[in-house]
Amino acid sequence: MRSTPPIVSILVLMTAAIVAGYPAPNVYASTGPIPLNCDRACLENVLNQYLSALVAHDPAGLPLSKDVMYTENAQRLEIGDGFWKTVEGRGKYSHYFADPEFGQVAFMGTMIEAGGPILMSLRLRIQLGRITEIESVFFKPGGGGPNNIADMDKPYEPEDIWFKSIPAEKQMSRQELISVADAYFSGLQRNDGRGVNGTGTYPFTSDCHRIENGSNTTNVPRPPNEAPDTINLFSMDCLSQFKLGIYFVVQNIHGRRFPLVDRERGVVWAHAVFDQGTVSKGTLSDGRPYQFPGFNRPSSILVTEVFLIENGKIRRVLAVAPSAPFHTNTPWPGSLSGD
């Protein structure tokens, strides 16, 4: 079989970069220790290299593109600064995600800083044999909102359903998976209980479950003495929460990006910013008035959200979501505005 000329391979990779919404890296990055056709195992190995270098406080040996972009909680930094100086080790929770089609690999897990665990989401982009993008988001103790970092560091083992391979003939397209994930954000922002495009339905399985900052925010058993008509948001399933129209505190979900899509496993890794806090009172879809306690100051949440999608419906949601200044805008290109 005739091999593809190197220049053709480079052009194909550069075209893929443009389609994904990001510019290709400088041509000098066309050589390096990472294979051009980096599969799942290869991408996960690069991620391990990065985490080892991070813990060692030494990025010198990493295959970095000269124009690599690095952020911590949406702030651009130089490699070696910030968390690179304070990290003390890896925690006991690790969950890897990979997108060999577009050279993306990601990690959600615990790291050790200041003597205890924190939650980190980390995304790397590999292009032409080099790491060109590094996006880190940290949730740390005292970050507010629902959280249970310690529970994720017991350790926490990701469910097996995250790692099942979907037969090729049953796999959804990249855009179909992204559309399902984006419907989650749109349904939450519209908050009218009417479902996607007014259809009355939302793309959730009957056993959908969500974990935010290590805390279960769906399907939590009610306290035994709680009145059955009490509005207990976290005791509901995903569908019931959305149909109730209880998310009026979230005014806008912008900066939506879906850089990693794993078609083989039905996974979408997303980033977005939730603006909230200027509205705390509202009327639920069943006509009841409701007021959220504590939502009386403008703020945003810098969200990393990972969706496990089965047959066009969301079955699991994982999130790392620290607080951020109101109307935070990330420096990453390719973002979508809310709708």
Image: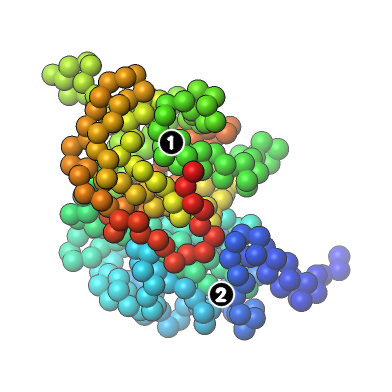
Q: Position of residue 206 (x, y in %)?
A: 45, 24
- 116 relative position to 76: left or right: left
Asked where in the image residue 220 lies, by quadrant, the reply is top left
Asked where in the image residue 74 lies, by quadrant, the reply is bottom left
Regarding mark 1 in the picture, which secondary structure is present there? helix
Image quadrant for the N terminus?
bottom right
Q: Residue at x 64, y 81 (%)?
A: 27
Residue 323 appears in the figure: yes
Mark sitting on residue 46: none
Q: Position of residue 43 (x, y in %)?
A: 54, 63
Q: Is residue 216 above or below residue 95?
A: above
- In the displayed orientation, state which residue is furthest to the right: 1
Q: Position of residue 251 (x, y in %)?
A: 36, 43
Regarding mark 2 in the picture, which secondary structure is present there? strand
Q: Position of residue 184 (x, y in %)?
A: 47, 38
Q: Is residue 26 above or below residue 204?
A: below
Q: Residue at x 67, y 63 (%)?
A: 16
Q: Which residue is mark 1?
A: 190
Q: Nearer the viewer, mark 2 or mark 1?
A: 1
Mark sitting on residue 130: 2
Q: Residue at x 70, y 38 (%)?
A: 169
Three-letter amino acid code at the position of disc 1: Arg
- In the displayed orientation, state which residue is furthest to the left: 225
Given residues 336 and 311, the one toward you in this image is 336
Residue 49 appears in the figure: no
Whichever of labels 2 and 1 marks the residue nearer the N terminus, that label is 2
Three-letter amino acid code at the position of disc 2: Arg
Q: Residue at x 52, y 82 (%)?
A: 66
Distance, label 2 to label 1, CA atoms, is: 40 Å
